[in-house]
Image: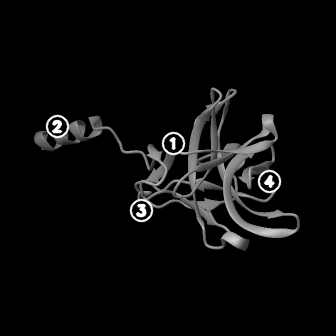
Amino acid sequence: MRSFAIFLVALSLLPLRAAVTWQPYKGGTGLPKTTVFAGAEDGKNKGLRWFVCRVPYNGVMMVGKAGEKTCNFAVPSESRGRRREEFEIAVESSTGTWGPAKPGFKGALQAGPATGKPLIPCRATFTNEGATIGIHAGVVSGDTCQAEFSQKIVTSKTYEVYYPGK
């Protein structure tokens, strides 16, 4: 019985693996199979798959969508989108789910702090000039999900956030 108690104490001292980790990525090197999937493009790029990414930009962490080569993110202060080939991707150890935001974003994936507030990745079905452009990942900003599309910023008041698996 004593050895079992020692085993439990030793087990409790092991670091727990987070359900989602942020891993460095350089465009074109092949995304891990367990990268957090956010959605796919419609229109001329139909089927292009998007994953959750983050990247430092001008001293601030930004959240966006990653394909095989770039992390595309909205930059509100510049009223445009940007792209980077070196970034971090969200990789999960157990499958989570996308769903409506809970009060205070309780349990939602966070991509770090920005100006004292947590950065919450989101996804939404976006339109551009009246046409559906697919489901894209972005970041919660106020009461909207804000994402990059064709180097522009698109927003949606209807969005989901990611809840990591256990």
**Nearest to viewer (mark 1 / mark 2):** 1
Mark closer to the chain start, 2 or 4: 2
Give the residue type at disc 1.
Glu
Residue 152 image point, x, y percent? 78, 50
* Mark 3 or mark 4, earlier in chain: 3
Q: Helix, strand or loop at disc 3?
A: loop
Amino acid carrying mark 2 in the image: Ile
Helix, strand or loop at label 4? It is: strand
Q: Position of residue 126 (x, y in %)?
A: 77, 62
The residue tagged with tag 1: helix, strand or loop?
A: strand
What sort of colour scheme is used for the picture?
Answer: one colour
Q: Is residue 143 left or right of residue 12?
A: right
The disc at residue 6 is 2
Direction from residue 48 to residue 21 in the image, left or right: left
Mark closest to the chain's N terminus, 3 or 2: 2
Cβ–Cβ under 8 Å for marks 3 and 4: no
User: Callout 4: 10 Å neighbours few (<14), some, many (20+)?
Assistant: many
Q: How far is disc 4 from disc 1 in space, using C-alphas?
A: 23 Å
Type of the residue with mark 3: Lys
